[in-house]
Image (spheres, rainbow, N blue to C red):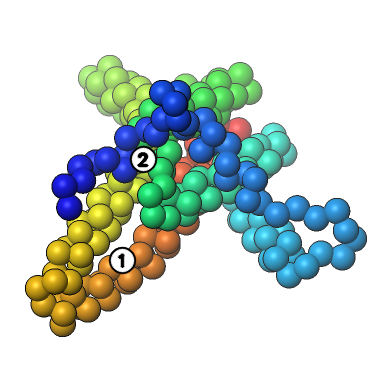
Amino acid sequence: MNENLFASFIAPTILGLPAAVLIILFPPLLIPTSKYLINNRLITTQRWLIKLTSKQMMAMHNTKGRTWSLMLVSLIIFIATTNLLGLLPHSFTPTTQLSMNLAMAIPLWAGAVIMGFRSKIKNALAHFLPQGTPTPLIPMLVIIETISLLIQPMALAVRLTANITAGHLLMHLIGSATLAMSTINLPSTLIIFTILILLTILEIAVALIQAYVFTLLVSLYLHDNT
């Protein structure tokens, strides 16, 4: 009970060396692959989900935007598996670190914006000034649109970090309350434990939804610039 509330968010180390890189590389090892012509149910379901997700995200893109399909599918699989593994006891969730989420958001956002300026520079610049803007408001709107463009990767990273961190903190608090009440009042313990189970199910859904939302927003940024 004396454990620090934020101890699970501290980057782990092995013999004084950071282990975050090993943890980040671990989720891809859990993705099953098959060398056989006829796949089992797990591989078939996995490929069906990947095909469904990529089809839904790539439906609005042109030919140039669809070249990002492999990257976006890999991104959603990586974030989803990382979030789900973070729900295991005594595990570390890299997506609770704002620095890592920024490291994912900034290059993807920058790549989409640079592609837009290279291929459709007139349309890209037109986003900074909506049509029909009164002349006195032009400088202010250009500044506002520039800030809104530059804040997009920060919003991506903060949204993912906040949602995953909040869920982990709430589960930690309710779990601690369940352990504390177990020696005091058994009926209250059962009620709190039921709430903890329901919250865990909700966090599994949140882990998958946040992976989809992060990837979908990157896809929308790409669509605006292609």
The residue where tag 2 is placed is 96
- Which label sits on residue 199? 1
11 lies left or right of 37:
left
User: Closer to the camera, 28 or 141?
Assistant: 28
Residue furthest out toward the right: 37
Residue 60 visible? The answer is no
Residue 153 vs 70, above or below: the answer is above
137 lies left or right of 69:
left
Residue 50 vs 185, above or below: the answer is above
Residue 97 figure quarter: top left
Which secondary structure lies at badge 1? helix
216 lies left or right of 91:
right
Residue 154 visible? The answer is yes
- Asked whether disc 1 touches disc 2, contact meaning CB atoms under 8 Å apart, the reply is no
Residue 122 percent location from the top left of the image: 54, 22
* Amino acid type at mark 1: Leu
* Amino acid type at mark 2: Thr
Residue 106 vs 46, above or below: the answer is above
User: Closer to the camera, 129 or 85?
Assistant: 85
Residue in the picture at 31% in, 43% down: 8
Residue in the picture at 42% in, 62% down: 205
Earlier along the polypeptide chain: callout 1 or callout 2? 2
Cα distance in 3D space between marks 1 and 2: 18 Å
Which secondary structure lies at badge 2? helix
- The 10 Å Cα crowd at callout 2, few under 14, some 14 to 19, many 20 or more, is many
